[in-house]
Image (spheres, rainbow, N blue to C red):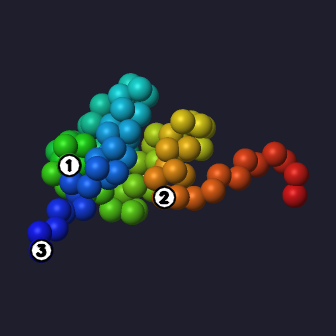
């Protein structure tokens, strides 16, 4: 039985594409993102080209750099990707 590597999974590719678009929307270069994450520009390029898988800790850092907390579109995309429910904080406990 032939299995496609998860790095080529359509959902994963769409997720990475969304992150790449967000980087560009924010006006950040791959080098700027790499420096913020303690990585090389080449590593960011490989992630965006689906030549290298992003790990969960790198994803956490990427989402912080891409300001997921202040970006409703990206936040909803992440929530949908992971199949989570989004609970809007309205200041009430």
- Please name the residue shown 33% across and 62% down the image: 55
- Please name the residue shown 30% across and 31% down the image: 29
- Rendering coords of residue 63 (x, y %): 46, 48
Q: In the rendered image of this protein, does residue 61 appear above or below residue 77? A: below
How would you rate the neighbour count of disc 1 (Cα within 10 Å): few for under 14, some for 14-19, many for 20 or more?
some
Quick one: 61 or 20, which is closer to the camera? 20
Q: Seen in the image, is 22 located left or right of residue 85? A: left
Mark 1–mark 3 distance (CA, rounded to whole Å): 23 Å
Q: Evaluate if marks 2 and 1 touch, with contact meaning CB atoms under 8 Å apart.
A: no
Residue 50 numbered mark, or none = 1
Of the two numbered discs 2 and 1 on the same chain, state the one appearing first in sequence: 1
Of the two numbered discs 1 and 3 on the same chain, state the one appearing first in sequence: 3
- Please name the residue shown 27% across and 36% down the image: 30
Q: In the rendered image of this protein, does residue 56 appear above or below residue 27? A: below
Extreme residue toward the right, this view: 92
How would you rate the neighbour count of disc 2 (Cα within 10 Å): few for under 14, some for 14-19, many for 20 or more?
few
- Rendering coords of residue 31 (x, y %): 26, 37
- For label 2, the residue is 82
Mark 2–mark 1 distance (CA, rounded to whole Å): 19 Å
Judged from the image, the secondary structure of the residue bearing numbered disc 1 is loop
Q: In the rendered image of this protein, does residue 76 appear above or below residue 23? A: below
Mark 2–mark 3 distance (CA, rounded to whole Å): 27 Å
Nearer the observer, disc 2 or disc 3? 3
Residue 1 numbered mark, or none = 3
Q: Quadrant of residue 59?
A: bottom left
Judged from the image, the secondary structure of the residue bearing numbered disc 2 is helix
Nearer the observer, disc 2 or disc 1? 2
């Amino acid at each position: 039985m032939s299995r496609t590597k998860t790095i080529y999974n359509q959902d994963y590719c769409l997720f990475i594409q969304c992150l790449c678009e967000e980087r560009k929307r924010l006006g950040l270069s791959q080098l700027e993102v790499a420096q913020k994450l303690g990585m090389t520009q080449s590593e960011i390029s490989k992630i965006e080209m689906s030549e290298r898988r992003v790990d969960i800790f790198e994803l956490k850092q990427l989402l912080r750099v891409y300001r997921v907390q202040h970006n409703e579109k990206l936040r909803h995309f992440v929530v949908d990707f992971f199949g989570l429910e989004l609970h809007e904080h309205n200041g009430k406990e």
